[in-house]
Image (cartoon, rainbow, N blue to C red):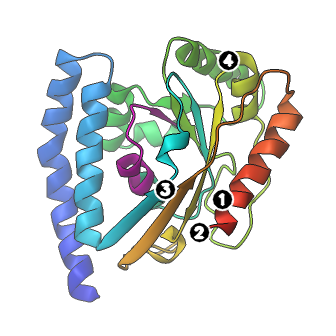
């Protein structure tokens, strides 16, 4: 275990430095962020390989064409690489604003067009919502963790309302995603990485037409719970 973690962290940092210039070059050539997103996906594939993490995904046929709002539960830190390598479409992460200040990683997130959300209520939050709605209407799919934080325990935490405002105002369908297994790979507060199997299950899309924010929230919660029961 010690040797594996030494290899993971020992290689992970230089690989980040090696791939960052490719992300920068991709951004200079393609300002859509698609190239940077692909470099990020490569980085995450390498991270999963080094960590001995295998990902099994089902339900890909449930992802419709056009912009969608991918909504997943949040079990652990490895949710992000597991989902990014599993989902065969261009999408943008919605993340806390503070993450974009991290050197290299945060810069790459900005170049990829990932979306910072100011989680504090008030004008900043509403401004973030409006900007994200415009991105979705412009054809960008997004991925959100509505619990807002990692939850290694069974069940789901209360959902934040922002994602459902996005669906209501943009008209984009919600695609519910259940993920399980990442909670034991790297536990909260620890840097120790353990090999493991991750299962991802994608449910049928939920169309927001005719549904209010609260209805969308309840329907999405039920859909993710149903997918969790099947994996």
Q: Quadrant of residue 28?
A: top left
**Residue at the disc numbered 2:** 231
Residue 188 visible in the shown view: no
**Residue at the disc numbered 1:** 227
**Residue at the disc numbered 4:** 170
Alpha-carbon span between mark 3 and mark 2: 10 Å
Mark 3 or mark 1, earlier in chain: 3
CA neighbours of label 2 inside 10 A, class few (<14), some (14 to 19), many (20+): some
Q: Are marks 2 and 1 in contact (CB under 8 Å)?
A: yes
Mark 3 or mark 4, earlier in chain: 3
Q: Quadrant of residue 224?
A: bottom right
Point out residue 193 in the picture as x, y percentages from the top left corner. 37, 76
Q: Quadrant of residue 110?
A: top left
Alpha-carbon span between mark 4 and mark 2: 31 Å
Q: Secondary structure at mark 1?
A: helix
Residue 222 visible in the shown view: yes
């Amino acid at each position: 275990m010690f040797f594996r973690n030494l290899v993971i962290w020992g290689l992970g940092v230089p690989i980040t430095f090696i791939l960052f210039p490719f992300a920068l070059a991709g951004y200079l050539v393609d300002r859509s962020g698609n190239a940077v997103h692909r470099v990020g996906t490569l980085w995450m594939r390498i991270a999963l390989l080094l960590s001995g993490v295998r990902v099994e995904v089902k339900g890909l046929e449930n992802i419709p064409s056009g912009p969608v709002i991918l909504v997943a539960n949040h079990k652990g830190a490895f949710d992000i690489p597991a989902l990014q390598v599993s989902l065969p479409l261009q999408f943008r992460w919605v993340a806390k604003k503070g993450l974009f200040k991290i050197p290299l990683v945060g810069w790459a997130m900005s170049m990829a067009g990932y979306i910072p959300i100011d989680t504090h209520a008030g004008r900043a939050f509403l401004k973030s919502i409006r900007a994200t709605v415009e991105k979705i209407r412009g054809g960008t799919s997004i991925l959100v963790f509505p619990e807002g934080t990692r939850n290694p325990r069974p069940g789901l935490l209360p959902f934040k309302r922002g994602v459902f405002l996005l669906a209501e105002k943009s008209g984009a369908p919600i695609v519910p995603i259940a993920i399980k297994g990442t909670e034991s790979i790297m536990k909260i507060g620890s840097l120790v990485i353990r090999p493991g199997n991750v299962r991802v299950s994608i449910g049928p899309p939920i169309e927001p037409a005719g549904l209010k924010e609260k209805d969308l929230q309840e329907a999405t919660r039920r859909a993710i719970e149903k997918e969790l029961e099947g994996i």
